[in-house]
Image (tube, rainbow, N blue to C red):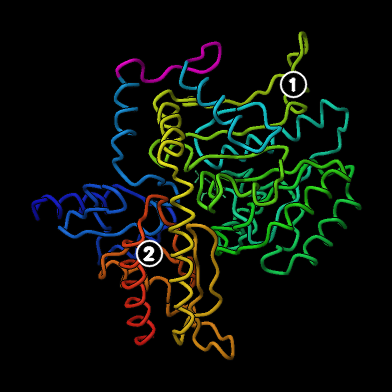
Amino acid sequence: MEEHKRAQLLHKDRQYVWHPFTQMKDYENQDHLLIEKAEGIHLYGADGRTYMDTVSSWWVNVHGHGHPRIKQAIQEQMERMDHVMFSGLTHEPAIVLAEKLVERTPEGLTRVFYSDNGSTAVEVALKMSYQYWQHQGHKTKHKFIYLQGSYHGDTLGAVSVGGVDLYHAIFKPLLFSAYQAPSPAISGMEQSLEAIEDLMKRHQSEIAGIVIEPLIQAAGGMHIYGADFLTRLRALCNTYEIHLIADEVATGFGRTGKMFACEYAGMTPDLICLSKGLTAGVMPLSATLCTEEIYQSFYDDYETLKTFFHGHSFTGNPLACAVGIESLNIFEDDNLLGHVQEVSAYMQQQFRRFADLEHVDHIRGLGMVAALNLVKDKDRQEAYDPVKRAGYQIYKQGLEEGLILRPLGDTIYYWLPLCTTKEQVDTIIARTSSVIEKVTAKL
Ligand code: PMP
């Protein structure tokens, strides 16, 4: 892009645009990275430089950018129909995708409710769970349990079950009250399950459901825990008759090495929330799937109050559904999970080598996700002074080396597109190593 056009756009960006999760003052004396093209796992800057996207564009991208089959699916759908409302009307892409989702998600989830982003998928699950109990005559079941360090989105219902103070604390006066339980990844599995059971026992008549991110608590800091927790949580939910809501918005669609993280425990939640990878990260769409029992409680000839009064203008967008279908076809045709198994094993092995670096601690990973913490002193478990903004320095140095890294605090992580190759892993690892060494030397 011509330099004067780039400068002009960035000037207008500063003048008109408010970016999410961003202290805009940081951009008084620096530019946002202006991207003009994306292909595969590469983003092309208007500055003429190429960047490897190690975070899959906020954890959404699956097959790389600009996949020819995805492009074709959108184009063909666009020729037929762009968007129509989804109440009273229906269409083939939404129907076909729903059937595929029921087939592909854990057995026992039979009905698909569409919305248009991850937060709304969670909102829908919370409201469905609550309303189900109302229908069953359990009028006092209106509370939810969530885990410390959890993140389920930025709308108020999702924030009410969010456990990250940095994002959530300021909004507390606006939220409904919910019970926080210790995280299996942060406090340990036994302590977490004990506290959850205690809450369920003491407040059974009040609690509608527990909402969790299966295996990876992502935005809270890439905290990873074992599948046993899911198995035992399922048992507790059965015992105390409480819904298990699995938020697989981030972990779904192969990122952990299986199609859904719940599969590691062979576990079926009562509700599952999907988005991000649902459309290979190309279109906004989400789906909340529930069991037949939940669905049937809303099914009634006469009582309009059993209707689920929830819907968004762009619910079930046909273009997005067409992409979702094609993405699932690519999973099958390319044996993508086989590729993920091979590349992720290699990536995890290479990633562990960062343990040798002086300021790297707590290496962990699953599937195409890997994370480490930067620490000032490993032996003394001493963190860097937050004013040093170690993560932000990593982000900036990453750009210098042609990498998009978006640390969460001092946690550096990968959330790689599923199509990433071993050769690309090598390049990403080498560049990350250089970034970490340069930044920690300066800190
Ligand atoms: N749930 C989880 C587990 C997430 O990671 C996210 C987004 N990072 C959301 C929900 C919210 O999704 P969205 O940003 O599409 O609203």
Amino acid type indicated by mark 2 = Leu
Image quadrant where one finds the C terminus: bottom left
On the image, numbered disc 2 is attached to which residue?
A: 405
Which of the marked residues, 2 or 1, is nearer the chain's N terminus?
1
Q: Amino acid at mark 1?
A: Phe
- Magenta stretch prevailing secondary structure: loop
Is label 2 in a helix, a strand or a loop?
loop
Compared to residue 349, the image places residue 323 above or below, namely above
- Secondary structure of the residue carrying tag 1 is loop
Quadrant housing residue 284: top left
Q: Nearer the viewer, residue 170 or 340?
A: 340
The residue located at (55%, 44%) in the rendering is 259
Q: Which residue is label 1 attached to?
A: 298
Classify residue 390 as left or right of residue 196: left
Q: Which is more toward the observer, 357 or 382? A: 357
Q: Quadrant of the rendered structure where residue 98 is? A: top right
Tell me the crowding category of disc 1: few under 14, some 14 to 19, or many 20 or more residues within 10 angstroms, Cα based. Answer: some
* Residue 233 in picture, x, y percent from top left: 78, 52
Mark 2 lies within 8 Å of ligand 1 (Cβ measured): no
**Residue beneath the point at 86% across and 37% down:** 140
Residue at the image position 40 percent from the left and 52 percent from the top: 417
Write down the region rendered in magenta: 79-91
Taking depth in this image into account, of 58 and 231 the one nearest to the observer is 231
**CA distance for labels 2 and 1:** 44 Å
Residue at the image position 34 percent from the left and 67 percent from the top = 426
Q: Is residue 202 magenta?
A: no
Figure check: 78 above or below 23? above
345 sits left or right of 237 in the view: left
Q: Is residue 214 left or right of residue 16?
A: right
Q: Residues within 10 Å of mark 2 (few under 14, many from 20)?
A: many
Q: Position of residue 320 (x, y in %)?
A: 42, 30
Q: Are marks 2 and 1 in contact (CB under 8 Å)?
A: no
